[in-house]
Image (cartoon, coloured by chain):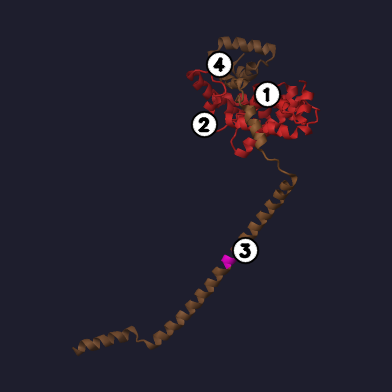
């Protein structure tokens, strides 16, 4: 047997599920090939590491805890279950509606503010135009300053 | 006490019969949950949930199959749901602490052998995790819980040939995964 064939049958051989002829060839190969022998040893260690399950056992107070859990559980009536099943989707729907309402309100306030801001901007522009008409231009101010300076 | 009369006694509300039932099957239920790589504390909780379900629903048990088959089904379903719900895969992402926790099941190993077996368990569980759900169940029940093909077929509600096919593919995939690891 070559190493490739040995590796192809290694798991079946480990679990003792190889055909008798194959098992014999595998055994012979193991005795002669050091590399495959090491591999088989590693595999045996890994697959055997789950053996702890065979000895696993629950806590000695398992029944005491279980019994306490069963007796502490309040029996839920069919009406309570039905109400819970009805109330849960209703609550979810109400919350969704509330969310939409709040969203619409916020959006409405924002758009109102936008119009107010736009209006104020328009009135500011009108005031500026009026001011420009009544107040002297920058060129005139310079002339007045120059006038006072010259006066000294 | 015979199984049928034990079940009948539980139905009538006999606490003693339920205790006998739990004592008889708690190890079986606990081991099957543990074999799916569930941590000890979670395995205890899940085992309790299995028996609570039995306590409340034993009237529905039709006695067409063995009670152990029913228990296996409940335990496997609860375990698979637990893994899905917690997104805590049974075999992946195990920290060293989680693996070390497994040694609390059996406290007989020396610290040196414990370290080696912890590493080996990580390799094994990571490899098993790469299998599909049905391959995992079939492989775990056959190789770790040592159930026969027929028993697995009844529990999984599939034919014996399907179990054989699942196990064949599971072993091939596991072999490939383990050989890649040791390459």
**Against B136, is A54 above or below?**
above
Which secondary structure class fits the magenta region best? helix
Secondary structure at numbered mark 2:
loop
A106 drawn magenta: yes
> In the shown orientation, is residue B122 left or right of residue B54?
left
For the N terminus of chain B, the image quarter is top right
Question: Which chain letter matches label 4?
Answer: A
What is the magenta range?
A103-107
Gap between marks 4 and 3, in whole Å?
A: 69 Å
Q: Which mark is residue A101?
A: 3
Whether residue A139 is visible, yes or no, is yes
Report the chain shown in brown.
Answer: A
Of badges 4 and 2, the one in the foreground is: 2
Q: Residue furthest left?
A: A152
Q: Are marks 4 and 2 in contact (CB under 8 Å)?
A: no
Question: Which chain letter matches label 1?
Answer: B
Q: Which mark is residue B95?
A: 2
């Amino acid at each position: 047997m070559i190493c490739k064939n040995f590796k192809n049958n290694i798991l079946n051989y480990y679990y003792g599920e190889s055909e008798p002829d194959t098992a014999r060839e595998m055994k012979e190969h193991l005795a002669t090939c050091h590399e495959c022998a090491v591999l088989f040893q590693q595999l045996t260690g890994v697959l055997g590491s789950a053996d702890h399950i065979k000895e696993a056992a629950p806590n000695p107070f398992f029944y005491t805890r279980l019994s306490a859990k069963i007796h502490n559980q309040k029996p839920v009536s069919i009406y309570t279950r039905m109400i819970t099943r009805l109330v849960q989707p209703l609550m979810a729907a109400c919350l969704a509606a509330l969310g939409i309402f709040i969203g619409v309100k916020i959006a409405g306030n924002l758009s109102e503010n936008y119009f107010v801001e736009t209006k104020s901007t328009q009135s500011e522009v009108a005031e500026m135009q009026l001011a420009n008409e009544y107040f002297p231009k920058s060129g005139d101010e310079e002339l007045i300053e120059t006038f006072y300076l010259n006066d000294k | 006490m015979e199984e049928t009369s034990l079940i009948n006694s539980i139905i009538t509300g006999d606490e003693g019969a339920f205790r006998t039932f739990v004592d008889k099957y708690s190890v079986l239920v606990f081991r099957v949950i543990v074999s799916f790589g569930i941590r000890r504390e979670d395995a205890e909780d899940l085992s309790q949930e299995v028996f609570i379900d039995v306590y409340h629903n034993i009237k529905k048990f039709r006695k067409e199959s063995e009670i152990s088959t029913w228990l296996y089904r409940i335990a496997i379903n609860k375990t698979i749901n637990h893994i899905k719900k917690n997104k805590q895969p049974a075999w992946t992402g195990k920290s060293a602490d989680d693996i070390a926790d497994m040694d609390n099941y059996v406290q007989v190993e020396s610290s040196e052998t414990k370290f080696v077996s912890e590493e080996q368990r990580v390799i094994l569980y990571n490899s098993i995790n790469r299998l599909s759900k049905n391959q995992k169940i079939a492989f775990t029940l056959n190789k770790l819980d040592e159930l026969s093909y027929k028993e697995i077929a009844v529990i999984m509600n599939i034919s014996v040939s399907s179990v054989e096919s699942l196990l064949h593919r599971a072993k091939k995939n596991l072999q490939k995964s383990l050989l890649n690891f040791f390459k």
